[in-house]
Amino acid sequence: KGMQSWAAGFEALEQAIYYDATGDEFILPEIRKRAIWAAMGQSGGGSWGHTFSFPESNGGELHKRNPGYGGMNNAGGRCFFLLALAKKFGIQHSEIDLAIDRASQFFWTYVDKGCIPYGDHAPWPSDDSNGKNYGPAFAFYVLGKPYEAKFFSMHSANAAFSRRGGHGSPTLWYYTPLSATIAGPKAVMASMRNMRWFYTLARRHDGSFVFQGDQAGIGGRGMRSPTATHAIYYSVPLQKLIITGKDADPSWWVNDEELEELLVSARGQITDPLLLKGIGKAWPERDTDALIAMLDHFYPVVRKAIAKELGRRFAAGETAIPGKVLPLLASPEARAREGACLTLTACGTDTVLANLSGIAKLLNDTAEFVRMTAINTIAGATKPGDSKREMMLLKMAAGEYPDMSCDIANVVTVCKTALFSGDKKNEAEQASKLGTTPFEAGYDRDLVRSALEKIITMDPSGVAPLDWTRDTLVELAGPVVFIADELQLMDKMFSAGRLFMGRELLAKYGYREAVECDVVNLLKRSRLERDVRYNVIFVQGGASGYYGILNPIAVEARPGAYRRYLAPMKQWLQDDPLAESTGLGSDWVSRSVGLNVIISKVEADSKSYEFPSLASDAAALFEKELATKGDAAGKTKLCRDVLSNRENKQFFRKMAALSQLAVLVGPEAVNDTAAYLGDEQWRLREHAYNVALGLVKAGAGDRLAACLASVQGEHAAGILRVLRDAGDPAVLKAVSQALQHREGVVRKAAVQALMTLGGDKALSDVLSFMEKTTHPDDLWGCELALLSRRDDAAFCQRVRDEAIARLPKRTVPVRRSLAWVLAQLGGPDSLAALQAAAATSEDPKDVQNIVKALSYAPDRDADQVMLALAKIDRMRLDAVAAESVRRMVGPNGMGDVTDQQRVDFAKAILDMKLENRLIQFLGKVHTGRSIQLLFDVMQKTDRTVVAAHAIISAADGMEKPPEDEAKIAADALAQVIEYIEVTRLRGGMAAHMDKDDKYLEWKEIQARAGKALIKVHKPQKAPIPTFDDMQLDM
């Protein structure tokens, strides 16, 4: 799955360009498949990474974060082009449409602001880098957006006059000139003529071509044939491909004025006589009127440079410049309006203040980049703490605009920078209360709350100043907790600041929510279906060590505070007994800790931790606000006004509003809770559940059941959950109807509710529903329903009997669920049925499903069933070995299995097949038998390396071992040390300079082995307490 975005951006895109040129229907199905795949692989921010944003990298969700370090616009722009062509070809799919919308907003963010950067970053002050204009230019061209397409196309033409930048394959830059074709023959001519020397040097004696070396020392090998690539350039006059001018629209081509802009901006690097002939003077040498006329230049870098030059001339005595520029503030050309604003800024603060009324009109400009410049101009000429300045910034930040671009460069971005420069040493900045007590600054509270929420939750660069008081935090509880819970979607390469700030602010005031933020992904994971859950991770990027499933350093600081989360921890451990959690300490050194170790520390900590709840403080604050609203009607209105905005992040205000409505209007409030019973924010979702449950128990069941007709998805599932737990059988009809719902998540909740509310009589209905479906959600719901009464022995026996009877005759998906139920119930009859089913099936997937179910069985007799199956044939042995490590733990963690049971089972498996994960786990079993088994594996098999690592871990964890076990450990460690010396270190560093030799890594491993040897061998004196395995003698 690596580099999928590059594959789509080259292979699939080239297929699409071929189809566009030829109409060859043979290739269209492949284009459709790969376009949908690329659309589904897009991040939620509209970009693509080196590879796709796979759900298994994002907690099971589509369109979240890019893997690795984030966005990779060179590949992503090409994916955008592919999707635009797919839409042109008539390929219809909702994922493609949504991906185009997201990509359009993302890449449009850079129009008139700067060059497309490496990833999800701010606009870069250049024209092109490594061919990144190519994809977006043609995507906007295909989508019929000439302004955006021409912007990127002219920048590509301009790039022929600047140095080639970027790194990677030299092939990438070669696409820059192709996107110049959108701007027409004159742009292509200018671009190609200035690069004739470059193409000439690429020509070889035999007529073939080469690429001109690597870039920045990386990627000297071309990704495509140099000769074929150059042939495409030279075929531009033929206009046979969309990338060489096929079906060009002349109305998009540069006119003479635009061509002059292009050449003037590049004047310093042009050497071609024909191009030089028509340019004239370099722009800095031109008179002031000529420069003013050029303020609408297409290139933002030049536009700013011209404004700066005019400001210099104003300071030198040309005082008429502001008067000449002012009329341009009302120009129909947005670039001219921005150029005028930039010039007034360059003329100084007094000039800006003298013309503030005209500049202020640009705050409502139709062009976002003009609004941004106007904000910067006014903010730069006024002082922090100035009430008019701050009101302007708050209003602009809180505003909603139809053409809002991404938070990497929009109105909120510049407002944030102006309000929170971070310069706390500046006396003027200290005069502003927005960085400490914004709700005491005298501004409208709703405005402050709305504006600051936008700034806090900016993706990626939101802020929550650590100087905010406790009262400020309570006012903004929802947005702050949101950023502390959720790593931003964009720019994981460098920007994880909002996550850190949110968590630090919560920790500063000791709130319980600081602990909850550490486990939010653990809780998300626990709600996933088991096969999905097993494979998911949460991508981290710049937040590596902070945003995984669990931060071990935070847990180790106060283990008992995490006691309430032991169940999802143990679930994770059973899913993956080798699971480790990684975290960063205050020294920024990364540490990985085994999940089994974390669990043992949590269980061992008897200390009671009590933290104040931010939710409680926010509720108290809301009650004060509610008290000012007079009668019940006024209070009800406030509550519903708060709940009416589903998009904002005021979670705690909404929670308080739901609680108050339950008191104010009684059963009627159940309608208000229905909209939040499936909310993405788990605190709000759980609070709505508790409020609704109380109301239904008080008689609002029918009213809540009626809401099923007006909600969908998780919200409908949430209603069914409440009805189930309220235990009112009067709503059974509505529950039964929900079994026919079109969404699996609703049917899953309905079948569980049916089982609970229908009692024993519902068992046959549940089993009948199960037999007629293959949908994963339906089957998952049936599993949960059938296992919902484990404390009822008679009911469990009925379920066991029914499942055993049905197991031999059902489809593979249903057998998977029946096997799971039987394995969880356990007992001789269940295990015998599973053994017979797995022993007779010839379907590898079916066998794998049954064996996996057995691997989770709480009944330890399942060990013997798995071993018996492994002895039948290779197919069953492979299935058992793959799941064998899970028998090393149980539902309640390590304590469910003794070390003797572990080693017995592991030896039986390893005698039949070597399984790396099982060998690795034995490193967690700190006994002589485990080490002896590992030593045998190391000596007698090809798994020497993994066994050596496990021996070190097993010995290192020994505490006061018996003398015979200590000797086994010492002998094995001595062999490990010798093995490493002979096979990995002999000859010293000079003999192992290849990075793949990993000399330093092996030196450190040998040092660990030596430290463990000193610990277990007990020489004449005690181990040296200051021995540091990282301080290696080289």
Image (spheres, grey):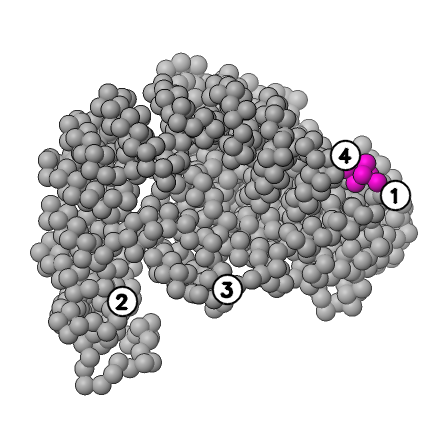
Tags 1 and 3 touching, CB below 8 Å: no
In the rendered structure, which disc, 3 or 2, sits on the residue that comes first in sequence?
3
Mark 3 Cα-neighbour bin, 10 Å: few <14, some 14–19, many ≥20: few
Cα–Cα span, label 2 and label 4: 67 Å
* Residue at (36, 35) in percent of width and height: 787
Q: Quadrant of the C terminus?
A: bottom left
* Residue at (25, 51) in percent of width and height: 888
| SS of the residue under disc 3 | loop
The percent coordinates of residue 502 (x first, y second) are 60, 55
* Residue at (43, 65) in percent of width and height: 605
Q: In the rendering, which numbered label is found on residue 579?
A: none
Magenta residues, start to end: 631-636
**Which residue type does callout 2 highlight?**
Gly
Cα–Cα span, label 1 and label 2: 73 Å
**Which residue type does callout 3 highlight?**
Ser
The percent coordinates of residue 897 (x first, y second) are 25, 53
Q: Which residue is mark 2?
A: 957
Which one is in front, 778 or 90?
778
Which one is in front, 375 or 684?
684
Q: Which residue is mark 4?
A: 366
